[in-house]
């Protein structure tokens, strides 16, 4: 099997045309014509993940976050990105990233979050511009769905903490009503706060929120930051299932490395 065969499955599920303009999804290192011995999937690509891939016989790593995101002027062993690239080049390990294009399909990152929460009747929170030719109907940012039964804000956050393993959930003051309509956006979703409010969400779950952004709901909606890693951690499962469905007898492995760079101190 060639890397091109893996790429075809990934790009059918999440076309590169759906990535945001600032993104760098796609084949980052390697040739589509190379033979692939196994695939390792991960949320992030660190040196530990690359070493595990090599150790377990995988010649292709598929990560959600691109290892090269900004422009590079040099590749050296002095920084984490350079260390990973040098190692992968030396060990003939190819790299593919499936980032905002996987965020922007309903069955992608946000679809997995909604599924874990048990949300029903989901729809895209911010559809792609309908004023332009869009060959991918239903694509867009974030999702809005409904819980089978309303929950108090404390019961809702307790459930979220259990499901996503969030050590800390930072949140705004809740709206004075039960939570049933829930908006979600994996990763950094502050750009969707106004959309969640306009959609009548009782709660919006995302990550990477700044201090002043917690003022925006103004008592109209619960805004909760469950952590960037925590919100996207199940993306590896999504990728593993996607590839195993198409290649059931091929080696598709999920990294055992916990790549969350954030640690918590609490007593």
Image (spheres, rainbow, N blue to C red):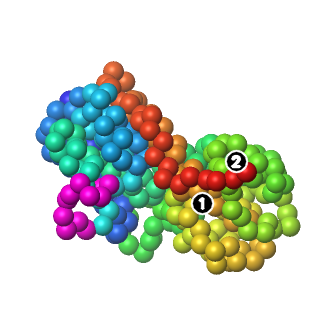
Q: Is residue 76 magenta?
A: yes
Q: Within the image, what quadrant is residue 196 found in?
A: bottom right
Residues at marks 2 and 1, CA–CA distance in whole angstroms? 13 Å
Question: Quarter holding the N terminus?
Answer: top left
As helix, strand or loop, the secondary structure at mark 2 comes to helix
Q: In this picture, is 20 found above or below 216?
A: above
Q: In this picture, is 206 found above or below 97?
A: below
Query: Which residue is at 64% across, 74% downward?
Result: 211
The overriding secondary structure of the stretch rendered in magenta is loop
Residue range (magenta): 71-81
**Front position in the image: 46 or 147:** 46
In this picture, residue 7 sits left or right of residue 223? left
Q: Position of residue 41 (x, y in %)?
A: 38, 39
Numbered badge on residue 161: 2
Q: Is residue 97 magenta?
A: no
Query: Which residue is at 23% across, 66% downward?
Result: 72
In this picture, residue 35 sits left or right of residue 172? left
> Comparing marks 2 and 1, which lies closer to the viewer?
2
Numbered badge on residue 63: none
Numbered badge on residue 206: 1
């Amino acid at each position: 099997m060639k890397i091109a065969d893996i790429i075809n499955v990934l790009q059918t599920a999440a076309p590169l045309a759906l990535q945001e303009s600032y993104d760098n999804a796609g084949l980052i290192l390697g040739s589509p014509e190379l033979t692939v011995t196994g695939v390792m999937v991960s949320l992030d690509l660190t040196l530990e993940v690359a070493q595990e891939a090599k150790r377990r016989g995988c010649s292709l790593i598929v990560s959600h976050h691109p290892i090269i995101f900004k422009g590079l002027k040099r590749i050296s062993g002095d920084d984490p990105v350079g260390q990973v690239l040098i190692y992968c080049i030396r060990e003939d390990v190819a790299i593919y990233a499936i980032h905002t294009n996987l965020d922007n399909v309903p069955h992608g990152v946000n679809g997995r979050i909604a599924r874990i929460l048990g949300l029903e009747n989901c729809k895209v929170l911010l559809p792609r511009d309908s004023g332009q030719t869009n060959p991918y109907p239903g694509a867009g940012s974030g999702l809005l769905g409904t819980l089978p039964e309303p929950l108090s804000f404390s019961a809702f956050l307790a459930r979220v903490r259990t499901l996503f393993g969030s050590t800390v959930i930072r949140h705004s003051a809740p709206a004075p009503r039960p939570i049933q309509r829930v908006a979600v956006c994996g990763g950094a979703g502050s750009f969707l706060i106004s959309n969640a409010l306009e959609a009548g969400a009782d709660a919006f779950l995302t990550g990477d929120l700044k201090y002043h952004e917690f003022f925006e709901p103004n008592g109209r909606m619960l805004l909760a930051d469950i952590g960037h890693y925590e919100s996207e951690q199940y993306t590896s499962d999504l990728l593993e299932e996607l590839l195993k469905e198409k290649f059931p007898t091929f080696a598709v492995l999920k990294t055992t490395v916990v790549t969350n760079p954030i640690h918590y101190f609490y007593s």
